[in-house]
Image (cartoon, rainbow, N blue to C red):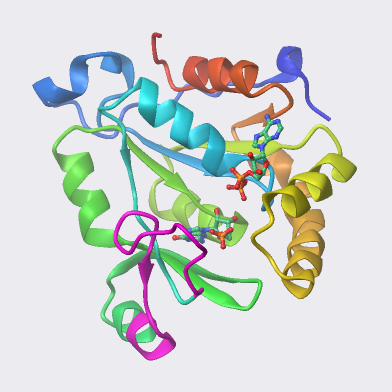
Amino acid sequence: MAGWETITVVPRPALTLLPSPTALSSVTDSAGRLTVITGPSGVGKGTLVAQLLQRHPPIWLSVSATTRSPRPGEQEGSSYFFLDRPSFERQLAAGGLLEWAEFAGNLYGTPRQAVEHQLAAGRPVLLEIELEGARQVRQSFPAALQVFLEPPSFEELERRIRGRGTDSEEAITRRLARARIELAAASEFDARLVNGDLLEALAQLEQLMGLTA
Ligand code: ADP
Ligand code: 5GP
């Protein structure tokens, strides 16, 4: 498992050279750049990203479309755009998704237009997506920074998924099986972060993204 000292950072050029003034508060070096965060379900992507956004408001997090049912507390339009399968498939057929994948029996995808609009405006954009989607983005946005978040151990990952208390036993089994596949692909990414201590992982992510506190 990668520790702090094993993190590899591959410098990549920014996607646009025209950052908007609003993006300059703490993110001068990464304005207009696309960052992808991937990692197994339950590793803490959502938790880490929420902390990052709180500390760096100029970062724009893409809201995905999904056919999954909302979990308690999730909001239409801010957690996800919750669609039925035919609506999702129509959006896909119309070229409206930047990437998409089936995950644990549901479809997930990134609405294209909003991402392109934010990048064109010079804003740093974050995608929190699974492995297949990250691979598609690697093809379409080779300059994007791709970060893989790892758990301290597989046992801790299972504890976190169960502790979250949002998934059925069947969903947990599917997500753990999928987690093994995702963890095996970690070396494809520009950087690997272990989410042991949350604040440590946050500091490492900030460093990778060229953010100052
Ligand atoms: P993901 O978005 O990757 O599916 P979540 O952000 O929902 O994962 O986190 C899964 C569970 O793990 C949540 O209950 C969260 O509070 C917990 N968690 C996240 N990061 C940590 C951490 N660094 N240490 C301990 N628990 C964590
Ligand atoms: P969850 O159901 O736990 O919210 O998400 C399941 C998985 O789908 C997570 O790994 C999450 O990162 C991923 N995911 C969320 N949105 C997207 C998306 O737009 N595209 C892809 N490919 N994966 C997504």
Q: For the point 77% across and 20% down, which residue is it?
A: 3
Give the dominant element type of the magenta stretch: helix, strand or loop.
Answer: loop
Q: Position of residue 65 (x, y in %)?
A: 38, 67
Q: For the point 37% across and 80% down, which residue is it?
A: 88
> Which stretch appears magenta?
68-88
Q: For the point 58% across and 17% down, which residue is it?
A: 204
In the depicted view, which residue is nearer to us: 4 or 165? Answer: 165
Residue furthest toward the bottom?
86
Q: Position of residue 6 (x, y in %)?
A: 75, 18
Residue furthest toward the left?
21
- Ligand 1 quarter of the rendering: top right
Residue 170 figure quarter: bottom right
In the depicted view, which residue is nearer to us: 63 or 185? Answer: 63
In the depicted view, which residue is nearer to us: 41 or 20? Answer: 41
Residue furthest toward the top?
213
Residue 15 figure quarter: top left
In-image side of 53 versus 3 (left or right): left
In the depicted view, which residue is nearer to us: 17 or 20? Answer: 20
- Count of number-bearing discs: 0
Residue 122 figure quarter: top left
In-image side of 141 versus 116 (left or right): right
Q: For the point 55% across and 15% down, which residue is it?
A: 203
| Residue 156 is inside the magenta segment | no
Q: Position of residue 194 (x, y in %)?
A: 72, 28
Indicate the quadrant containing the N terminus: top left, top right, bottom left or bottom right. top right
Q: Is residue 120 above or below residue 213?
A: below
| Residue 71 is inside the magenta segment | yes
Q: Is residue 168 above or below residue 160?
A: below
In-image side of 193 versus 75 (left or right): right
Q: Is residue 20 above or below residue 199?
A: below
In-image side of 158 versus 105 (left or right): right
